[in-house]
Image: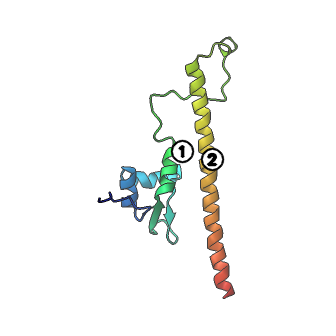
Amino acid sequence: MAQAAEKPQMLNSWKEIASFLDRGVRTVQRWERELQLPIHRIGKGRRSPVYALVPELKFWIATSGLNSAPHLRVVDPTAKLPVAKQNSSTPLEISHRLMSQSLELVRAVAEASVRQQRQAEILRKRLREIRSRLR
């Protein structure tokens, strides 16, 4: 039985990344600048070759809020309800508040994860530089 071709675990160009995300190249480049899309560069500079890892992209999609339903009203979890309404919260309002809070927690974890991964990448690069000097 023939297996379906699996998507590559690494995307090696803006075009491949854009195709995976089903968006245009310029949109994906803007997302890298403005929304911290996890893109890696080979070399230095803005025009250096890029690549992206599929698991990182999937994690970013899940935590960036891009797939959240636009018809859902986001309730500010820090906003205090008026005294008259505090005891009369409907289950729907409570659900919206909890969903909003969980989304904020997921985003915070994702940002910390991406930050930690980038710091680890910088440390690996510095270690390679130090090792090359010692040889």
Residue occupying image coordinates x 61% and y 66%:
121
Residue occupying image coordinates x 59% and y 16%:
90
Left or right side of 72 for 116: right
User: In what quadrant of the picture does the C terminus appear?
Assistant: bottom right
* As drawn, 30 above or below 85: below
Residue 42 in the image: x percent, y percent?
49, 70
Residue wearing tag 1: 63
Name the image quarter holding residue 96. top right
Which residue is nearer to you in this view: 34 or 64?
Answer: 64
* As drawn, 81 above or below 76: above
Furthest-left residue in view?
1
Q: How packed is label 2: few (under 14 Cα within 10 Å), some, or many (20 or more)? A: few
Q: How packed is label 1: few (under 14 Cα within 10 Å), some, or many (20 or more)? A: many
| Residue 109 badge | 2
> Pointer 2 and pointer 1: residues touching (CB < 8 Å)?
yes
Residue 54 in the image: x percent, y percent?
46, 57
Which residue is nearer to you in this view: 117 or 24?
Answer: 117
Residue occupying image coordinates x 36% and y 49%:
22
